[in-house]
Image: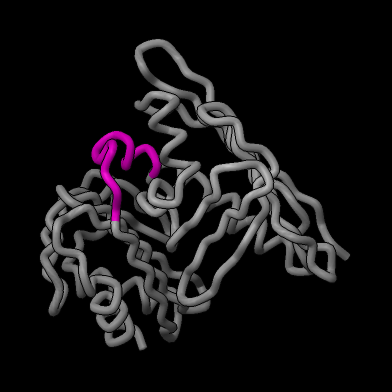
C-alpha cells in the first residue's frame, strides 16, 4: 500500500526572481546546483527530465508561470507511487527572493527510509542553490555525477576524508587543500557537512560527496571552470578506484 507524503520548505535567496527562475526552470540552470543532467521544456504540458548514471526520469510540467510558479508530476506506477514538485517564487525588497518548495507524492512499502532521506536531502540541495546564486550567478556548470559501492558508509567516509586530506571533525567553514590523484586540486571551503554528505566550494566549482549507510558512494559536482571535458569520466574512475 502506498504512503502519501508532503515536504514543504522555504528558502530566502540572495537573487532576483528572474535569476531564481532561470536556476529552477531551465535545464542548464538546474544542472548548476541539483543532480545529473536536466532538460525542461518551457511550457505547461512539456517534459522535465533528469539523467543520472545513465538512468533517465521524466515528469510532466503541470504548471509553468515564468518568474512565479513551476510544478511537475511523474507518472503513477503500478503500486501507486509518484512524485510531484512545486516551486513558488516571491520577490522581496533589495533584489532578494523567497522560494517555497513543496515535494509530495506517494512512496512504497519502505516509505519511512525514503521519506527520511528526502527530508534530510532537501535542506542540503537548497543550500547548494544558495551557494550557486551567491557565488556563481549567471554562470552555467558542467555537471559531474559518479557512483560506486564500498563496504560500508563509514568506510567510504573514511576513504574520502583520507584521499582528500580533509580536516576532522569535518565542519562547515573548514578550509580544504586537496589533491585527488590524477585530478585538479581542490582549494576551497566546506559549505556543508553532515553525517551523509559534504560539499566544498572553490573559485570554480561546487564539489559534493555523499555516502549512504549501505556503502553507496555518490558524487554530484558542478564545475564552472573553462576545462571540464572528460571531468565526469575522470572523477568516476577516481571514485571507483577509491572505494571499490
Q: Looking at the rendering, which quadrant does residue 130 occupy?
A: top left
* Magenta residue span: 129-141
Picture quarter with the N terminus: bottom right
Query: How many marks are shown on the rendered structure?
Result: 0
In-image side of 124 versus 135 (left or right): right
Q: Name which residue lies at 41% across and 11% down.
A: 93
Return the x and y of residue 185 as percentages of the image width and height: 11, 65
Return the x and y of residue 26 as percentages of the image width and height: 46, 45
Q: Name which residue lies at 20% across and 74% down.
A: 163
Q: Looking at the rendering, which quadrant does residue 79 occupy?
A: bottom right
In the image, residue 98 above or below residue 43: above
- Res. 20 in view: yes
Residue found at the far top of this picture: 93
Return the x and y of residue 82 as percentages of the image width and height: 74, 58
In-image side of 73 versus 69 (left or right): right
Nearer to the camera, 38 or 87 = 38
Colour mode of the rendering: one colour
Q: Name which residue lies at 47% across and 18% down.
A: 91
In-image side of 28 versus 239 (left or right): right
**Per the image, is 92 magenta?**
no
Return the x and y of residue 17 as percentages of the image width and height: 44, 25
- Res. 170 in view: no
Nearer to the camera, 179 or 60 = 60
Q: Name which residue lies at 54% across and 74% down.
A: 55
**Per the image, is 138 magenta?**
yes
Picture quarter with the C terminus: bottom left
Amino acid at each position: 500500500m502506498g504512503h502519501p507524503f508532503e515536504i514543504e520548505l522555504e528558502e530566502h535567496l540572495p537573487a532576483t526572481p528572474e535569476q531564481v527562475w532561470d536556476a529552477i526552470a531551465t535545464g542548464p540552470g538546474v544542472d548548476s546546483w541539483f543532480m545529473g543532467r536536466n532538460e525542461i521544456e518551457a511550457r505547461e504540458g512539456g517534459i522535465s527530465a533528469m539523467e543520472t548514471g545513465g538512468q533517465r526520469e521524466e515528469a510532466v510540467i503541470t504548471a509553468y508561470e515564468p518568474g512565479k510558479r513551476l510544478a511537475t508530476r511523474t507518472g503513477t506506477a503500478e503500486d501507486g507511487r509518484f512524485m510531484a514538485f512545486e516551486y513558488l517564487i516571491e520577490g522581496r525588497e533589495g533584489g532578494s527572493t523567497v522560494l517555497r518548495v513543496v515535494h509530495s507524492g506517494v512512496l512504497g512499502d519502505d516509505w519511512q527510509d525514503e521519506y527520511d532521506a528526502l527530508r534530510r536531502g532537501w535542506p542540503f540541495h537548497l543550500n547548494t542553490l544558495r551557494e550557486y546564486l551567491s557565488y556563481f550567478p549567471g554562470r552555467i556548470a558542467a555537471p559531474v555525477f559518479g557512483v560506486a559501492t564500498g563496504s560500508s558508509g563509514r568506510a567510504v567516509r573514511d576513504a574520502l576524508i583520507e584521499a582528500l586530506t580533509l580536516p576532522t571533525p569535518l565542519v562547515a567553514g573548514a578550509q580544504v587543500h586537496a589533491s585527488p590523484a590524477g585530478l585538479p586540486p581542490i582549494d576551497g571551503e566546506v559549505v556543508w557537512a553532515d553525517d551523509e554528505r559534504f560539499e566544498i566550494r572553490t573559485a570554480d566549482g561546487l564539489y559534493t560527496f555523499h555516502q549512504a549507510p549501505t556503502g553507496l558512494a555518490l558524487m554530484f559536482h558542478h564545475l564552472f571552470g573553462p576545462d571540464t571535458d572528460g571531468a565526469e569520466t575522470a572523477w568516476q574512475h577516481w571514485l571507483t578506484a577509491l572505494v571499490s
